[in-house]
Image (spheres, rainbow, N blue to C red):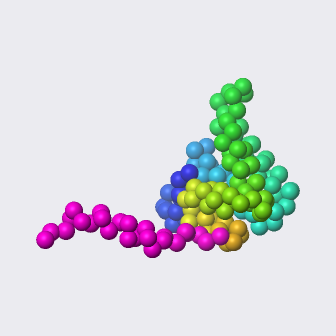
Amino acid sequence: MRQMDAASPKRLDMLDRPERRTAGAEEPHQVIDWLLAILRFAITRAQRDRGIVMATAHAMDRLGSRSAQRQFGFFARTSIAFCDAIAETNKPDRIVKLRRHLGKIENAGLRRAFAAALELDCEPKPSASRSRDREYLWRGLRRG
């Protein structure tokens, strides 16, 4: 998934002139729509919203399928895993799974919205030992 900056001239041009949009240009919008559907489920936890996520995922998978026999399933599999991690609040590995999914979202604003809805820190804080562990990297560069 590629991050689209709202201020980029290319995106603004496409927003201003819908007749110039191509199928390839619609893909980032579809991914954002899919992520927003998941965000809505994260907020409401309603089965209706989960159904919307799955319908969106299946529609996107059909677009990625080259033949009727072999169906692309990335969005459906990811939606199931993400929604399960959101809904199952008593699972011990839930936070790890949610952080993994959040890490794949390139749009920082959307990632922060998910973190807020899921009551997670947006960025994990680096541990103090990590910074000390990297001191050895500078030893070879120091003269003296």
Q: Residue at x 86, y 56 (%)?
A: 48
Quarter that holds the C terminus: bottom left
Q: Is residue 1 above or below residue 41?
A: above
The one nearer the camera, 22 or 43, is: 43
Q: Residue at x 62, y 65 (%)?
A: 110
State the residue lying farthest toward the bottom. 128
Q: Is residue 130 left or right of residue 119?
A: left
Residue 72 image-quadrant placement = top right
The one nearer the camera, 95 or 118, is: 95
Residue 63 image-quadrant placement = top right
Please say whether residue 36 is visible from this viewpoint.
no
Q: Residue at x 52, y 72 (%)?
A: 125
Residue 61: x and y, percent?
69, 40
The one nearer the camera, 78 or 30, is: 78
Residue 141 on the magenta span: yes
State the residue lying farthest toward the left. 144
Q: Secondary structure of the magenta portion, mostly?
A: loop
Region of the chain picked out in magenta, as a range = 120-144
